[in-house]
Image (cartoon, rainbow, N blue to C red):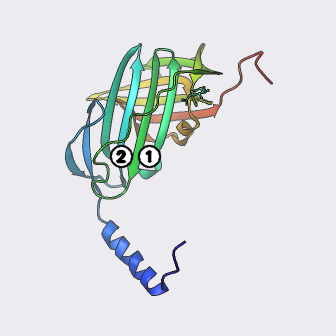
Amino acid sequence: MRPPTRPGSFLLATLLLCALLGLGRPLSCEVCKGYGPTCTGKMKTCEAGKDTCVVLVGESSTKGHKSVSIYKNCMKLSDCYSGFVSTTMSRDDYMVTNTRCCQSDGCNRGTVPLPQNNRTENGLMCPSCIAPFQETCPGTQAARCVGQETHCIYFAGNVQAGIFNTKFATRGCATESACYTKAGAEVPSASYLYFLRRADCLPAPWPPGRAE
Ligand SMILES: *[C@@H]1O[C@H](CO)[C@@H](O)[C@H](O)[C@H]1NC(C)=O
């Protein structure tokens, strides 16, 4: 523990911090995206309401086709989760991401480490489906959860890939950290930007015969 500082210097430091953070002044963040674990781009002034810079590195598998990608931009602090998220819809369709959210100009320069990708099944299962262009999906398949995935998600909304914007619905396994994402959020992932209309997240039930 540091010795306590004088109240006056604490107040001064607070005022100085506010001035340095430029409260009221828009934030600027580095903006880029691409394949691979790094990218560099131009600094952009964030639009109103976007008070946070984000840098995200993701590894995803789509029908067994794997890729690593990075995303840097402005976003809303309330939509931004700093840390690790893992989702699994099937053996060949999953995504793991590492994200850092920060709130000073250009703080999203550089990168974050590649997320861990533990594919070991943990015995939990969730209803699963992937339905592009749909508002709902039935979840009649079962996904086998891996690593730290202890929750089942049902996300639906719109997904933007480049200039292409379409509805989607999906269900599967996820880490508890995925529950941070709420309906109404605009969240980046490995290669797409999602606008979530529905974001259900519940603890995964044990499969029948396994436990209570
Ligand atoms: C990977 O996940 C399995 C299942 O949850 C767990 O038992 C194991 O300890 C994990 N391995 C690492 C290296 O985290």
Q: Residue at x 49, y 29 (%)?
A: 156
- Sequence-first disc among 1 and 2: 2
Q: Nearer the viewer, residue 84 or 151?
A: 84
Q: Are marks 1 and 2 in contact (CB under 8 Å)?
A: yes
Circle 2 residues within 10 Å: few <14, some 14–19, many ≥20:
many
SS state under label 2? strand
Return the residue nearer the eye: 134 or 33. 33
Tell me where residue 181 appears, x and y as whole percent: 51, 40
Task: Name the quadrant of the C terminus.
Answer: top right
The residue sitting at 30% across, 58% down in the picture is 27
User: What's the residue at 56%, 21% (across, down)?
Assistant: 120
Q: Is residue 64 left or right of residue 207?
A: left
* Foreground of the two, 163 or 65: 65
In this view, 63 is above or below 11: above
- Disc 2 residue type (three-letter): Val
How far across and down, in percent of the image, does residue 30 sit? 25, 48
Q: CA distance from mark 1 to mark 2?
A: 8 Å
Label 1 beta carbon less than 8 Å to ligand 1: no
Image quarter where ligand 1 lies: top right
- In the rendered image, residue 152, in percent from the top left (x then y), is placed at 60, 28
Q: Which residue is mark 2?
A: 54
Figure check: 118 above or below 46: above
On the image, which quarter does residue 110 sit in? top left
| Residue behind mark 1 | 80
Residue furthest right as drawn: 212
Instruction: Decide: few, some or many residues near mark 1? Use Cα within 10 Å; few <14, some 14-19, many ≥20.
Output: many
Q: Position of residue 15 (x, y in %)?
A: 38, 77
Q: Secondary structure at mark 1?
A: loop
> Residue drawn 51% across and 26% down?
118
Q: Amino acid at mark 1?
A: Cys
